[in-house]
Image: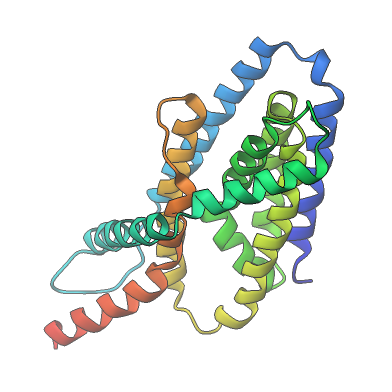
Amino acid sequence: MPFLGTIVNFLVVLVCGLIGLLIKKGIPKKVCDSLKSAMAICVIYIGIDGALDTAPYIGSELLSDGLIKVLIMVISLALGTLVGELIDIDKWVNRLGDSLEKRFVKEGEQGKFAEGFVYCSMLFCVGAMTVNGAFQDALGHPDILITKAVIDGIMCLVLAPTLGIGCAVSSVFVLVYQGLLTLAGLFLVGILPAESIAYMSSTGSLIIILIGLNMLGEAKVKTANMTPAIFLPALIYPLFELILSAFSG
């Protein structure tokens, strides 16, 4: 059943976000901060683990598979970040959060809605598990997204007491974004080479590491502006393969 993983992910984030609001006064700030740091380490680990996945076999006589993987990720991140900065995706996502805040949050309770919405939306929607999970979900295999839903739910439960209802509302962004990816996957999984999808995952994993560092306060990177980089390997890998084939031939 396509979209099952996305629906589960949406519901888990929504429910955990609402529960986090209900128990807001029952969780000391220092406990929330410690749990947030613990989850940040988990996020960084997930990013590193995904980035270090074995590079797909290409069989080039000129460059090793590992080097090709690094080059594709470097080029994708450079071009993707350039595109993201020119468009300023972070600004538009923040504007969306501000707009929702004005519409749904009462006067006097505003302030952290946009931060929670943007922070959780980016945390839950950028990276290897989202891209791979959505494509697998399109094939009727929701396992990856269901696993991701558990991680997202824990994070939302931890973040909602301090960042507010914006965390719960980010579930809508999860539903729309992953739903669109799954819809695209229905058309693209049979077209894109498995190697392209693998490189998309690896590139997204690098951004996950930055998200983890942001959570720890060790970095202040606009990761939203880097999201175009996740999709560029779908174009860059075939180009690499064509160039390497030409030189090898």
Toward which corner of the image does residue 101 lie, by quadrant? Answer: top right
For the rendered model, the colour scheme is: rainbow
Q: Nearer the viewer, residue 103 or 244?
A: 103
Which residue is located at x 87 percent, y 26 percent? 22
- Residue 1's place in the image compared with 53, above or below, is below
Toward which corner of the image does residue 129 lie, by quadrant? Answer: bottom right
Which residue is located at x 77 percent, y 52 percent? 10
Q: Residue 43: x and y, percent?
A: 53, 37
Q: Residue 164: x and y, percent?
A: 74, 30
Toward which corner of the image does residue 237 lie, by quadrant? Answer: bottom left
- Residue 35's place in the image compared with 189, above or below, is above
Q: Residue 33: x and y, percent?
A: 61, 17
Asked if residue 94 shows in the view, the reply is yes
Total numbered labels? 0
Name the outermost residue toward the front.
107
Q: Residue 176: x and y, percent?
A: 71, 62
Compared across the picture, whether 178 is left or right of 27 comes to left
Quadrant of the snapshot with the N terminus: bottom right
Compared across the picture, whether 123 is left or right of 117 comes to left
Which residue is located at x 78 percent, y 26 percent? 108
Quadrant of the snapshot with the C terminus: bottom left
Q: Nearer the viewer, residue 96 or 186?
A: 96
Q: Nearer the viewer, residue 172 or 156?
A: 172
Asked if residue 13 shows in the view, the reply is no
Compared across the picture, whether 6 is left or right of 77 comes to right
Name the outermost residue toward the right.
22
Which residue is located at x 66 percent, y 44 percent? 98
